[in-house]
Amino acid sequence: MPRPGRNTYNDQKPPYSYIALTAMAISASREKMLPLSDIYKFIMEKFPFYRQNTQRWQNSLRHNLSFNDCFIKIPRRPDRPGKGSYWALHPFAGDMFENGSFLRRRKRFKLHQQRQLQQLGLLPPDNNLKQGYEMTSFMQDEARMRLQQFAANATNAGYFNNLSQSTRQTYKQPFTIENIIAPETKPSSTSSTSFPVSPLPGFASQFAVTQNISANFMLPFHGLRPTESELLSSLANTYGQMNGRVSALEYYNSLKSSFHHPTLPLPIKPTALSAAALSSKSPENFDKPKPLIVHSVDSLLKPSKDEHSPPLNKRPEVLSVEELHRYNSDRPEAMVVSAR
DNA sequence: TTTTGTTTAGCTCTTA
DNA sequence: TAAGAGCTAAACAAAA
């Protein structure tokens, strides 16, 4: 029997989870991001079942948005005032449903806790990993061009305005592919950290930038150095073209084609690591790191509200070439760029 | 005040 | 059988 279409469930409860419904709504939107109210609206329009008991399922849906790493929050642009943020799918969550069907999820999408723990020295690095894939020079050129376009447009759109001087000083390197991918140099002594690990809490961090650097763009990587493929994936996603794993050809074409969302920032929601990287919730305490107290691995992954966090200067600042290679190969979902 | 967002907890169901 | 996924309720905080 053919499965009913999405609009034909009438008053029956559709077989989709809230995650699937939310992903559906976001995917259907032009900009691949929606405010909460529009997610509600989409679901109620498509599935009459959800026109009732709104309080119940909307609470569940909000819970899912917050709880699942596959959803990220995007702050509103200054020219789009309103309540709440926009919600989007995480760049690497694009393939969490089997065969592109919203009916079945492959596996829960989780950010890379192993890497987070390795970065904090709580897990030994895993040397037994496969090598990542090489980005062609064409891809690098394309990525470089897109990146420049992105940075320029974001600057013009005023994303980088109204930042405190201390925030600007945090980032010393120009925002270029070379600086992102190449082995890093030691930061100057005035810099508390060498890479866009934002000193700002929560969503303020999404606007943390300096001169040519868009921390927005780097935030999905939690201030860590992305692999080439991650970077390209993130870049492509920024322009609304990337959807999880793609074939090499699709990848190539997605970079070649023209994109129409030049000013859309790529955000990330605060995670255990970013939370742990922040010394306090209050902006006036950015420069007053608290001692790191890790009670357990679990507590690190899911820090409580009042738990102490590590100071920025205790975090690894520079990856060696070996570490970078290890890190690059520790990303199977990012390095699979083969035809299905 | 309402909406949005976060977190915790407890439950059921499915899967390995 | 344990672990993971999903659903629901609820408390609470922050923002508009």
Image (spheres, coloured by chain):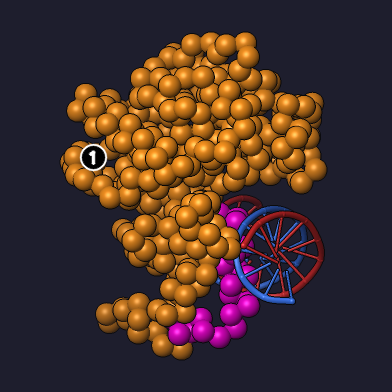
Chain colours: A orange, B blue, C red
Q: Amino acid at mark 1?
A: Leu
Instruction: Confirm whether residue A296 shows in the render.
Output: no
Q: Nearer the viewer, residue A162 or A255?
A: A162
Residue A272 pos. (x, y %):
64, 40
Magenta stretch containing residue A136, yes or no?
no
Residue A247 pos. (x, y %):
23, 43
Give the left or right position of residue A328, taking residue A36 as reference: left
Q: Residue at x 40, y 65 (%)?
A: A24
Determine the secondary structure under disc 1.
helix
Look at mark 1 in the image and give the residue it sits on. Answer: A255
Give above or below for A73 relative to A102. Answer: above
- Tell me which corner region of the image, top left, top right, bottom left or bottom right, holds residue A48: bottom left
Q: Nearer the viewer, residue A278 or A99?
A: A278
Q: Main secondary structure of the magenta part?
A: helix
Give above or below for C10 relative to A196. Answer: below
Give above or below for A313 relative to B11. Answer: above
* Magenta extent: A47-68
Q: Nearer the viewer, residue A238 or A114?
A: A238
Magenta stretch containing residue A60, yes or no?
yes
- Tell me which corner region of the image, top left, top right, bottom left or bottom right, holds residue C16: bottom right
